[in-house]
Image (cartoon, helix red, strand yellow):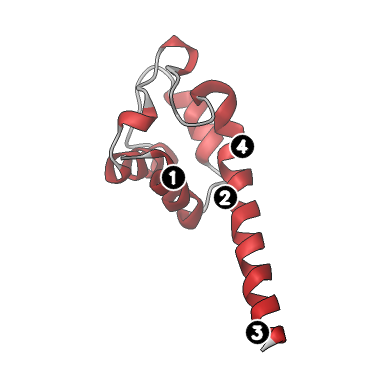
Amino acid sequence: MKKTLSIGLLLTLVSTLSYADAYKKCIGCHGANGEKVALGKSKIIKDMTKADLEASLLGYQNGTYGGAMKGLMVGQVRSLSAADIKDIANRIGK
């Protein structure tokens, strides 16, 4: 029982650290909770739905989404996994 509990706690910790690292690079421009207009040009991402936020991040990755900051955002999201994107959308989006 202790071994199972320890493994579960370890997986939770790894998952939490993984998410923290994924959104960490976003905080400087978008704020800790997605409340800022990044560089005076972006949407306030906390006002986006989870689905729209996930779709926009995936769109930046594949080049099908973006406005004035598209070039910058492509570089920011390139290394995110699908799980990272889903985690960010679930935490920040409505």
User: Who comes first in sequence, dot 1 or dot 3?
Assistant: 3
Would you place residue 8 above or below residue 35 in this image? below
| Residue beneath disc 4 | 24
| Residue beneath disc 3 | 4
Q: Position of residue 14 (x, y in %)?
A: 66, 61
Q: CA distance from mark 1 to mark 3?
A: 27 Å
| Residue beneath disc 1 | 91
Q: Position of residue 92 (x, y in %)?
A: 42, 39
Residue type, numbered disc 1: Arg
| Residue that appears at 60% across and 55% down | 16
Location of residue 43 by image quarter = top left
Q: In front: mark 1 or mark 4?
A: 1
Q: CA distance from mark 3 to mark 4?
A: 30 Å
Q: CA distance from mark 2 to mark 1?
A: 10 Å
- Nearest the viewer among 17 and 63 is 17
Instruction: Identify the element where label 2 is drawn.
Output: helix
- Nearest the viewer among 94 and 86 is 94
Residue 55, numbered circle: none
Q: Which image quarter holds the N terminus? A: bottom right
User: Who comes first in sequence, dot 1 or dot 4?
Assistant: 4
Instruction: Identify the element where label 4 is drawn.
Output: helix
Q: CA distance from mark 2 to mark 4?
A: 8 Å
Location of residue 3 by image quarter = bottom right
Would you place residue 45 above or below residue 86 in this image? above
Residue type, numbered disc 3: Thr
| Residue beneath disc 2 | 19
| Residue that appears at 65% across and 53% down | 17
Q: In front: mark 2 or mark 3?
A: 3
Residue type, numbered disc 2: Tyr
Q: In front: mark 3 or mark 4?
A: 3
